[in-house]
């Protein structure tokens, strides 16, 4: 009896008899020979079955097996440069059916509409492109953790039930917390500021919630954000950190996901440029000038719209760092530019090719009195922020950080239009099933 091997390891078994366990993805036949496209989660391989090798009965039975039948297949591994998927083929000697589908598999090999695919998300995950996205996401997460671990950051998990808003009150999900008003976390930042005062360099990485009423290709109601926070780090170093971080992620994905990027038919030119860092840096005011030159009617002082971000990123072949936005349109915790108090020491990173903002962050207001004023100006409940202002009461230091949205980053890396495919089970305004 041959040993069970995974398709990803098949090259180590050339010339051997092996057993694969997986699913029948596609079938076609011509006369006394049939071709079975098999998948096992680690890859796809073509199996070739000759009527003379397996006998009439099995040959006939296999010809009726529907798509997604689960199977155990035994055969001989042969190198073949012309084979689809990978340069190996399995010459099948035996096939055992584990379970035949009860009904016809809904996602056939023809094109389907997105609404239908989204309703069948639990099955759509099996599609080669969706598998490729899941692997790119996995490698992105690996790169995120490696980057911070290698630089001596400590991972601190922020709570999901919270008592205060971070990014404004309009996108909070309210929760009844034993009769008290609580919210699902919009950002772990405030907790990371506390942790940075204890541990120096920290990051959190977890689910984040925004009651976004907008149906755009960039918005989820539940997404994953990674948020580093560093004591004694000022604005310029924060920009360097964001740049190095993103370059590292892209570099790692390029190194580990060539097959996946090919499956996704991703042109990797801009990714290769991004992996080399040296991103262009412009101020908000310079960005507004560029926008005006390219037909946008944005008013100086307003935040960028989706279209503005698209125009801006099309001017650069790398991610671009935009710094010093107007303080008025930024959250209460931002530190003002000491040279121009109308501008904040903040940064956004915009991904090229029209993807737009994937990172947002900045230096935090470290002065107790100024922060108290901000909380009042933003009409936030002071009691809920008392612990946070304590951080300025006891040995306050300059500190900075940022948040990177995982799904938007993966969407750009994969070159896919919409963030909904970047998480296994997306949550959006009109989507909670499956
Ligand atoms: O710019 P944001 O709102 O920044 C913060 O939350 C800061 N407190 C982070 C920090 O400084 N620690 O969000 C950061 C990133 C965005 O750039 C974007 O990539 C992602 O989070 N993001 C979303 N992704 C998907 N769907 C949404 N609704 C998102 N909202 C933000
Ligand atoms: Mg932002």
Image: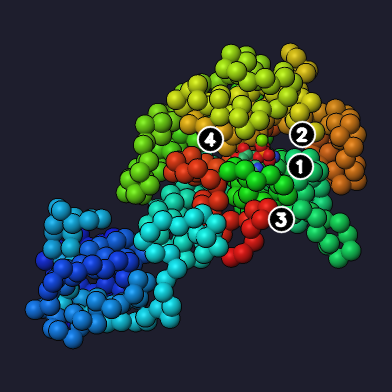
Quarter of the image with the N terminus is bottom left
Side (left or right) of 388 relative to 138:
right
Q: Quadrant of residue 300?
A: top right
Contact (CB < 8 A) between labels 3 and 2?
no
Q: Nearer the viewer, residue 331 or 365?
A: 331
The residue wearing badge 4 is: 355
The residue wearing badge 2 is: 331
**Of marks 3 and 1, which one's residue comes earlier in the chain?**
3
Beta carbon of the mark 3 residue lies under 8 A of ligand 1: no
Residue at x 48% of width, y 31% of height: 353
Q: Quick one: label 1, few (<14), some, or many (20+) residues within 10 Å?
A: some
**Of marks 1 and 2, which one's residue comes earlier in the chain?**
1
Q: Position of residue 147 (x, y in %)?
A: 49, 42
Say if 339 sits above or below 141 in the image: above
Q: Secondary structure at mark 2?
A: loop
Q: Secondary structure at mark 4?
A: loop
Q: Position of residue 4 (x, y in %)?
A: 27, 74
Q: Quick one: label 3, few (<14), some, or many (20+) residues within 10 Å?
A: some
Beta carbon of the mark 1 residue lies under 8 A of ligand 1: yes
**Of marks 1 and 4, which one's residue comes earlier in the chain?**
1
Q: Quadrant of residue 48?
A: bottom left
**Of marks 3 and 4, which one's residue comes earlier in the chain?**
3
The residue wearing badge 1 is: 166
Q: Position of residue 32 (x, y in %)?
A: 12, 74
Q: Secondary structure at mark 1?
A: loop
Q: Nearer the viewer, residue 94 or 275?
A: 94
């Amino acid at each position: 009896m041959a040993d069970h091997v995974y398709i990803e390891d098949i090259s180590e078994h050339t010339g051997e008899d092996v057993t694969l366990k997986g699913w029948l993805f596609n079938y076609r036949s011509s006369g006394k020979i049939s071709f079975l496209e098999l998948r096992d989660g680690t890859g796809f391989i073509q199996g070739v079955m000759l009527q003379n090798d397996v006998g009439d009965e099995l040959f006939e039975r296999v010809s009726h097996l529907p798509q997604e039948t689960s199977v155990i297949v035994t055969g001989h591994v042969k190198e073949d440069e012309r084979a689809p998927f990978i340069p190996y083929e399995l010459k099948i000697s035996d096939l055992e059916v584990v379970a035949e589908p009860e009904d016809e598999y809904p996602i056939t090999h023809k094109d389907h509409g997105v609404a239908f695919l989204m309703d069948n998300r639990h099955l759509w995950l099996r599609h080669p492109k969706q598998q490729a996205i899941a692997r790119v996401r996995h490698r992105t997460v690996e790169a995120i953790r490696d980057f911070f671990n290698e630089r001596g950051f400590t991972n601190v998990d922020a709570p999901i039930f919270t008592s205060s808003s971070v990014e404004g009150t309009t996108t909070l999900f309210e929760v009844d917390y034993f009769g008290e008003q609580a919210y699902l976390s919009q950002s772990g930042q405030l907790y990371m500021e506390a942790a940075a005062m204890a541990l120096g360099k920290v990051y959190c990485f977890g689910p984040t919630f925004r009651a976004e009423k907008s149906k755009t290709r960039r918005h989820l109601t539940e997404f994953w954000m990674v948020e580093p926070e560093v004591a004694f780090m000022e604005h310029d170093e924060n920009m360097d950190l964001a740049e190095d971080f993103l370059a590292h992620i892209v570099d790692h994905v390029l190194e580990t996901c060539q097959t996946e990027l090919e499956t996704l038919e991703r042109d990797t030119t801009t990714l290769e440029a991004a992996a080399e860092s040296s991103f262009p840096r412009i101020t908000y005011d310079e960005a507004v000038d560029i926008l005006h030159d390219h037909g946008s009617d944005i008013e100086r002082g307003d935040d960028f719209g989706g279209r503005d971000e698209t125009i801006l990123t099309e001017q650069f072949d790398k991610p671009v760092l935009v710094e010093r936005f107007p303080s008025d349109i930024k959250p209460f915790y931002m530190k003002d530019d000491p040279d121009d108090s109308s501008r904040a020491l903040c940064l956004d990173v915009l991904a090229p090719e029209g993807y737009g903002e994937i990172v947002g962050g900045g230096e935090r207001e470290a002065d107790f009195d100024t922060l108290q004023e901000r909380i009042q100006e933003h009409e936030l409940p002071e009691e809920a922020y008392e612990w946070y202002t304590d951080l300025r009461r006891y040995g306050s230091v300059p500190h900075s950080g940022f948040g990177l949205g995982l799904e938007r980053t993966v969407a750009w890396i994969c070159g896919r239009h919409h963030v909904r495919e970047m998480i296994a089970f997306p949550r959006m305004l009109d989507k909670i099933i499956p």
